[in-house]
Image: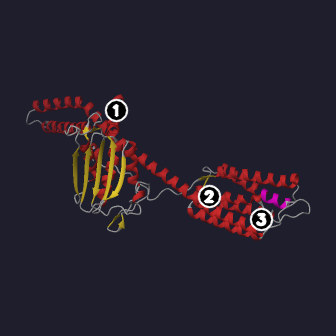
Amino acid sequence: MSLTEASKAPITPQAPKAPITDVSISLRKLVLIRWVAVIGQAATVLIVHFQIGFELPLTSALTIIATSVALNILAWQTRNVRARARLGDREAALYLAYDTLQLGILLYLTGGLQNPFSVLMLSPVVVSATVLSRSSVISLSALTVVAISILAVFHMPLPSRGDGTLNPGTLYVVGVWTALVCSTLFIAGYAWSVAVEARKMRDAFAATQLALAREQRVSAVGGLAAAAAHQLGSPLATITVVAKELARDLPADSPHASDAELLVSQTERCRMILADLARHHDEGSPFTRLPFSALVESAGEPYRKPSIEMHYEVEAGRGKDGDMLDEPLAASSPEIMHGLGNLIQNAISFAQHEVEVTTSWRADKVSVDIADDGPGYPANILTRIGEPYISGRTTAGAQLEGHMGLGIFIAQSLLERTGARLTFDNLSDGGAHVAIEWPRYKLEARNAATSLQEAVR
C-alpha cells in the first residue's frame, strides 16, 4: 500500500468487546485499611474495658484482633517480596471476606446486634462494591447478611458495668437487623453500579482519545510525506536531467543503453509518485478552506459500499435579502472527519439500500443530517444513544457482531468538542436519523484557530 493510499484508508478504532471489568487492587491499600481497622478495634476494646468499666471477654477479643495483626504483617511481607503487589478480584474478595468474619466474631463476643458498633459490618461490603466484580459483591453481601442474621440470634450478652445487664429487647434487635440487611443490599448495589458506570466512562474516553490520536497520526504522516515530496523534488529533477543526457549520449548499440532508458523511466515514475503525494497534501491541507459539504462527503467516502446507494444533498439557506448564503468553508480537523466518518459508517452498516447525507446552512448554524433505511433505533434505548457500550441496532433481527455502541460515543464526544450538538431519532417511515448542528460562528472560529496553530508550527 502506498503512502497516499494509507493516508486515505479509514481509521476505525478497535473497541473492546465489553467494558473493562478485571480488577487489580493495591495490596498496600487493603493492608492500610486493615491497620486502621485493627487499631480502632484494639483501642475501642481497651477503652471500653478499662476506662468505661464494661466487662468484656478481653482475652478472646484481643486474640481475634492479634490474628488480624499477624495476617497484616504477613500480607505486608508478601507485598515487599512480590514484584507486582496487586490483588485480583478473587484474592481481594477473600481478603474482605476474612475482615467480615473477623468483625462478626468480635461482635459475637460483645453483644451481637445489640452492640452499636454492628454498623461496621457494612464496611467490607462498601469497599468491595467500589472495586470488585458483580459476582464478588453479591458473594460478600450474602456473607454479610448471613453473619448479621446469625448475630441477631446467637451472641454473648452485651457487656455492662459490674453486675448490671443491658437488654435492649427483641424489637430493637429486629430493627437493627432489618436496617443492616437493607443497608447492605442498598449500599452494595448502589456503590457497585456507580463504580461500574465510572469504569465504563473511563474506558470509553480512553478509546476516544485513542481514536483521535490515530487520526492525528495519520494526518501527521500525510504532512511528513508531502514535506518529503517537496524536499526530494530538486534532487530528483537533477537525477532526471542527468539520466536523460546519459540516454541521449549513449550509442544505440551500447550495452548500457537499456539501463539508461530504465533509469529515465524510473525517475519519471518517482516524479509522478511525489507529485501525487504533494497534490494529496494540498487537497487536505489545513491552509485550504474546503466547502463544508465537500468535507462531509470526504469523511464518508472511505466507508462507501457497492450495495448501498449514497446520496449527498446540499441545501443552501437564504439571507434576509433573499440571496443565497455562501457555503461555510472548513478545515479538515481530525475531530470532524472522524466523528462524521463514524456516524456515516454506522448508517451504512445498518442500511438496507440507501443512505442520505444532507448538508445545510443558514446565517447562524450549519447542519448535517444522516438518514438510512435500516431498522432504526429500538424505542427502549433511543434516549440512551451515545452512552458507551449501549447498542440496540439490529440487522435482520440479530445484533450486529462487535457493535457495542462505542463508535457512536466516540463520534459524539469528538464532534461535541468542536461545538456540535447531536440528536438521534427514527424516521416516520423507518430508518435511523442523526442530526448534527453547529453554531456557524463556532465552526468558522474553530477552523480559523486550527489554521493559525498549523501556521505557527
User: For the residue labelled by badge 3, is the local secondary structure a helix, a strand or a loop?
Assistant: helix
- Say few, some or many: other residues with alpha carbon within 10 Å of mark 3 (under 14 / 14 to 19 / 20 or more): many
Write the start and end of the magenta stretch as one range: 58-65
Which residue, given by chain and number where applicable, does mark 1 sit on?
Answer: 454
Image marks 2 and 3: residues in contact by CB distance under 8 Å:
no
List the residue tagged with mark 3.
112
Q: Nearer the viewer's eye, disc 1 or disc 3? A: 3
The kind of residue on which mark 2 rests is Ser
Q: For the C terminus, which image quadrant?
A: top left
Q: Are marks 1 and 2 in contact (CB under 8 Å)?
A: no
Q: Secondary structure at mark 2?
A: helix
Identify which amino acid the numbered label 1 is placed on. Answer: Glu
The 10 Å Cα crowd at callout 2, few under 14, some 14 to 19, many 20 or more, is: many
Q: Judge the density around disc 1: few (<14), some (14-19), many (≥20) Cα neighbours within 10 Å.
A: few
Q: Find residue 200 and report its horizontal and vertical position in percent.
A: 49, 54
Label of residue 128 in the image? 2
Q: Which image quadrant for residue 371? A: bottom left
Q: Position of residue 313 (x, y in %)?
A: 22, 50
Residue 87 image-quadrant placement: bottom right
Which of 259/177 is in front?
A: 177
For this view, does 160 lie left or right of residue 338? right
